[in-house]
């Protein structure tokens, strides 16, 4: 099955969006690390860490899908 350019464009856009969301989550986590040193802040920082990891996994999955489609298009596997 041939991979269409429009499919590649969609996968690339999905990957880029996933990376942007990941970057945003990293920045949110970093901002919480700069706050006060209260227990509530530590809890918020830890929650941000979990969100960052979720977005990281989404970006990795989008990259895997896009790379797989590129391999299929150019190398037929």
Image (tube, grey):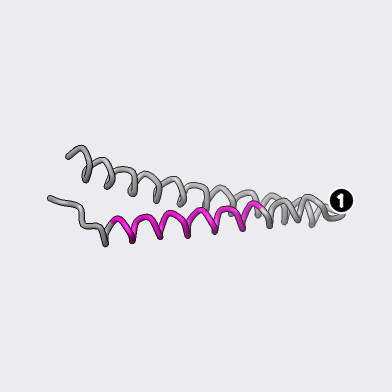
Residue at 15% in and 51% down = 2
Residue 14: x percent and y percent? 40, 59
Residue 44: x percent and y percent? 72, 56
62 or 42: nearer the viewer:
62
Residue 64: x percent and y percent? 36, 44
Instruction: Please give left or right for residue 55 compared with residue 30 in the image.
Output: left
48 or 3: nearer the viewer:
3
Instruction: Please give left or right for residue 50 compared with residue 68 in the image.
Output: right
44 or 11: nearer the viewer:
11
Q: Quadrant of residue 4?
A: bottom left
Instruction: Tell me the crowding category of disc 1: few under 14, some 14 to 19, or many 20 or more residues within 10 angstroms, Cα based.
Output: few
Residue 21: x percent and y percent? 54, 58
Residue at 40% in and 47% down = 63
Decide whether the magenta segment is chiefly helix, strand or loop: helix
Q: Quadrant of residue 28?
A: bottom right
Magenta region: 8-26
Residue at 69% in and 53% down = 29
Instruction: Please give left or right for residue 49 compared with residue 59 in the image.
Output: right
Residue at 79% in and 57% down = 40
Q: Is residue 24 magenta?
A: yes
Q: Is residue 14 magenta?
A: yes
Instruction: Please give left or right for residue 45 compared with residue 57 in the image.
Output: right
Q: Label 1, on which residue?
A: 37
1 or 59: nearer the viewer:
1
Callout 1 secondary element: loop
């Amino acid at each position: 099955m041939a991979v269409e350019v429009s499919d590649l464009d969609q996968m690339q856009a999905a990957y880029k969006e996933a990376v942007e969301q990941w970057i945003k989550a990293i920045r949110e986590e970093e901002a919480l690390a700069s706050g006060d040193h209260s227990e509530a802040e530590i809890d918020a920082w830890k929650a941000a860490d979990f969100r960052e990891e979720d977005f990281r996994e989404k970006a990795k999955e989008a990259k895997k899908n896009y790379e797989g489609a590129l391999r299929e298009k150019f190398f037929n596997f």
